[in-house]
Image (tube, helix red, strand yellow):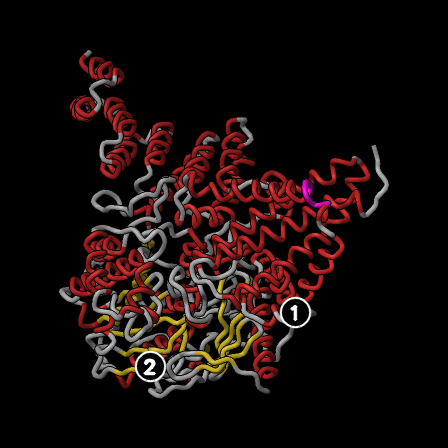
Amino acid sequence: MKKKFSYYNSLEYIYATISLIIIFCLLSLIELFKNFDIQLFTYKLLNDFFTGLLIGLLFFPLYLVLKYIKNPLGILVIKVLFSIIAIIQLGLIGYSLTTHINLGADLLGYSLSDMYTTVTASLSLSFLMLLPFMIVPIVYLGLIWLFNSFGHKINTKILLIVLFVFGSLTFVIANTKKNASQNKLNFLLSDIIRAENDKALASEGNLTFKKEFPLEKASESTKDVLAPFFNIQKEKPNVVFIIMEGLGSDFTDDGEYKGFTPYLDSLATKSLYWENFVSNAGRTFGALPSLIGSLPFGENGFMELNPIPKHNSLISILKSNGYTTAYYSGDESTFDKKSNFLEYNGIDKIIDINKFGPGYVKTKENSGGFSWGYPDAEIYRKTLSELKDKKEPRLDIIMTLTNHEPFDFPSKKVYLEKVERILNTKSYFEKNKMSEYKDIFACLLYTDNSIQSFMKAYSKRPDYKNTIFIITGDHRLIPVPQKDNLSRFHVPLYIYSPMLKKTAKFKSISSHTDVTPSLVSFLTNNYTFNKLEKTTWIGQGLDTVREFRNIHNIPLMRYKGSINDYIYKDYFYSDGSLFKIDENFNLNETDNDMMETITGSFNDYKKLNAYLTTKNKITNTATSFKKPTYAFTPEQLSLIKKLTKGLDPDHIFFLARDLAFKKEREKARLLCNYILNELPNYGDVRTLKGRTLAWDGDYKNAEIELLEVINRTPFYGDSYLAIMDVYWWSNQNKKAIEIGKKGLANQINDAELGYKLAQAYERMKNKNQANKTIDSLIKIHPENNNYVTFKKSLKK
């Protein structure tokens, strides 16, 4: 029955809104309980009141419409919606407590699969973890029940006036405070709107610049500042980049949490060491493009751009000058699309989680069965095993892994004991502040010890004396509280080499984007290199002045989708506030006439960033690149969009497999190509594509695809089985045996593969080898009747 709207029969909505505000306030109290600050809590309450009222006003029309349709429907839907909002607020607070930043526009910068990987790596799902998400809606509904039961005793009109007064105070007071006081849901939505507005501002109109390629300048304009520190030798030097996960300056040298990186601290006095150095991104996605390419960000990070704009990098330049190039990591190189970027630049070899094989131990899996991959010591050991004594100079890029949630690594107990001993040497205040993060400090000790062992082993190589090591962090560790927003980017830079004739410490500010310009200038000016007429770097090169200063304009992308921080001279602009940077890299808030100049410069960069990346205007003459992606026609893209709507890569694979079984193989391969654009190492997908080609009789291309699977994931068994089938069907029995033996060696007695190999030997009438192979399988699996039956058939 429809009811006429009145104040009294809508009290249920007012109670629902007030209950949501109370939930927000209770969650804020829980958030600050450990480090309670009355002033901050007051500001948070004001923001919670304001956000709750805003949500109430926003959903009120929906409530009225549903109530008009059917009376109970309106409040029922609102209760469900507001319960979900309360749960989201709880999740956002949990994220903030873990990462010490509010979740904002970066939510839009990651794919669902990337978010799933990150979350499952950091959390171990359990009933206790899920319990708060069950309690919050129960408490919320309980508050509504209390209001409905005892609301008649409250003068709700006076209550509403009080709420609106408190809510309006946020305009005067709360909004002037820092992000820590903001309601998490309010911040999320506001930051997404801000990011979208920034995007519109950066790309408004038809962007044009005085030059079609604004970054182009003569190579001589980047001065060679490194040569004075080196003994130049005849042979081109090897270059080794070590990009250490989470290595922030707060943990090295004289940082706030010092004492847990003794080897790196000792290296500071033996290297060229920049103490006021910054990463250009607050997460790993920005490290490779900035360090190796001195490239702009694009919208969500350079590696997310599709298609990737034409560009040069240290990889492509060194490769065109006779270097062999390789990348080493312990995780999946497709994460953040690192492999796409590396392959575009023609990297010779990628060693990642798929290529370690037996003899290497992964980081322990969490309760959900997820492991990021191999810990630092294993990454370095794998790197050393892959290095060959070749005449060609090398560029090796190593990205470490361990210094990241869940901070698990071998011999953890030993390192925790070391942490206790170090903490016992510190003051009561320092010890009390650090005790909560013992796991992380133990992890730092492990990563420091791992790189020390690597450098010691490398020093025994004959090419050590002609090698330049460049060591830096990808960004600062996230879970340990940071003193300010600049701290997130503050990382050390060490350039260490036996070739150094003098060392130095620099207080001048430089960033990741300045490394490749200086390194290329050094190499091209002092060794036999192809002449570069023009460069297209975002950075200007390292500053080797020892006093504190900044000659660079440095944009910073805290997370995907948000270029919200900027260094200009000795100023730091962040979230609309302006700070002065002192020589110790501390911030002091300032408000002066530089704000307009700095925001103008920052907006100019955003427009340049949009122009370069959306219009492919970085360069027109790339040195060497290989595009790994598949191109699609408009018709194909339309079909892909229709077929894949709402599906993640795994479910798209299942769909492609179903289509293949229904003999719609062209569609299946189209979907496979679509997935491989994003995830080129997805073995199941490429194997399915290879099988469909073989089913259609295209054995040549099937072989190419399946060999590519083996190249990328040599310890993935199904690809060997698939290619053996291809060789059988195309009567290439010798090749079937060769690939079977290779697969068996890699798979360590894989039962199905071994059985197929034994059958291949029989087919080649080599009963001796067939017997040996099947006997080895019977020893491992004596219960398998198929093996016994096959053994008997060989005797006939």
What amino acid does circle 1 point to?
Leu
Question: Image quarter for residue 292?
Answer: bottom left
> Is there a contact, CB below 8 Å, between mark 2 and mark 1?
no
Q: What residue appears at the point 33 percent right and 75 percent down from the top-left corner? A: 529
Q: Which mark is residue 201?
A: 1
**Quadrant of the rendering where the C terminus is positioned:** top left
Q: Position of residue 626 (x, y in %)?
A: 44, 57
The answer to whether one can see residue 582 in this image is yes
460 up-or-down from 638: above or below: below
What amino acid does circle 2 point to?
Asn
Q: What residue appears at the point 43 percent right and 36 percent down from the top-left corner? A: 690
Residue behind mark 2: 525
Q: Main secondary structure of the magenta part?
A: helix
**Mark nearer the viewer, 2 or 1:** 1
**Quadrant of the rendering where the N terminus is positioned:** top right
Q: Is residue 326 magenta?
A: no
- Given residues 96 and 718, the one toward you in this image is 96
Q: Position of residue 448 (x, y in %)?
A: 24, 63
552 up-or-down from 774: above or below: below
- Given residues 195 and 499, the one toward you in this image is 195
Among the two numbered marks 2 and 1 on one chain, the one whose residue lies closer to the N terminus: 1
At mark 2, the secondary structure is helix
Q: Position of residue 286 (x, y in %)?
A: 44, 64
Q: What residue appears at the point 17 percent right and 26 percent down from the top-left corner? A: 776
155 up-or-down from 576: above or below: above
Q: Which mark is residue 210?
A: none
